[in-house]
Structures are given as structure tokens and as C-alpha cells.
Amino acid sequence: MGLVSEDVLSLIKREMETNPEQIIRMCDLAKQYNVSRKDLHYSFIRKYGISIRDYHSRMKFGLFNILMREKNGSLYKTSYDVALTLGFKSDSSLQNFIKKMTGLTFKQYLDYLKDFWSDH
């Protein structure tokens, strides 16, 4: 198995951190950096201990939490606005993402966040 350079892996990681709302496709990354998808997948896991997809989901989830906190200050009018900002096509896509990340329904997670923020 060939290795993907540390520089390329760092660039990809930084891109996900900087723009978590962007859609990340492994085939596009592999083509952009002229490496195989398999090598990219395994090299990223070897270096960071997590897959590109999971790392990107974590970055997106972190941004979701920030945006929802700002929503309480009425920067965002609806969860649909937040969904679009995060690169989702619909509320239901965002809700499914939150369920996958937390195991809670969207409403349950929002209630949890409200309780958390009121205590801090």
C-alpha cells in the first residue's frame, strides 16, 4: 500500500477544519491530490486515528453546536437556515445527522443544549 504524504493529509485536515460545511468526497480528494482513494483512506486513519468521513462529521457537528448557540441570539431564524449553512439540503438531513452523531432526536438534543447552556 502506498502512502499519502503528511503534507497532503495535513492540507485535507485543515480544509475540513476551515470549511466543515463543504461537501467532502473521497473520490474528489483522491483525484485532486493524485492518490488512490484506498491509500488516502488508510493513510488518514493511520495518521489521525479516524476516517476522513468521521473527522469531517465531527467538524460539522462542532460547527452545528456553535451555530445553534448563535441561533439563540437569533442570528439564525430556523433550523433550516442552520441546515443550509452546514451544507445540508433539508431539515430532515440535518436531523438525521444529529441523530447519528448523538443518538438523540433533534428536539432532544436541542433541549440538552438549552439545559447545558443555561448551566454555563
Image (tube, rainbow, N blue to C red):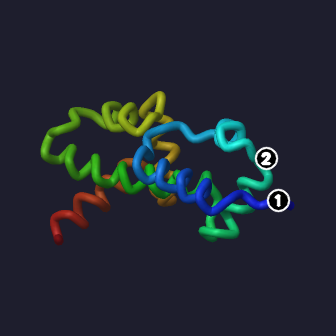
**In the rendering, at what x and y percent does residue 27 appear?**
71, 38
Q: CA distance from mark 1 to mark 2?
A: 9 Å
Secondary structure under badge 1?
loop
Q: Nearer the viewer, residue 112 or 13?
A: 13
Q: Is residue 13 visible?
A: yes
**In the rendering, at what x and y percent does residue 112 appear?**
31, 61
Residue 71: quadrant of the picture: top left
Q: Is residue 51 left or right of residue 93?
A: right
In the rendered image, the residue lying farthest to the top is 89
Q: Is residue 112 left or right of residue 117?
A: right
Q: Amino acid at mark 1?
A: Gly
Secondary structure under badge 2?
loop
Q: Is residue 6 left or right of residue 62?
A: right
Q: Residue at x 36, y 51 (%)?
A: 63
**In the rendering, at what x and y percent does residue 68 appear?**
27, 48
Q: Residue at x 64, y 69 (%)?
A: 47
Q: Give the residue at mark 1.
A: 2
Tag on residue 36?
Answer: 2
Q: Residue at x 28, y 53 (%)?
A: 66
Residue 51: quadrant of the picture: bottom right
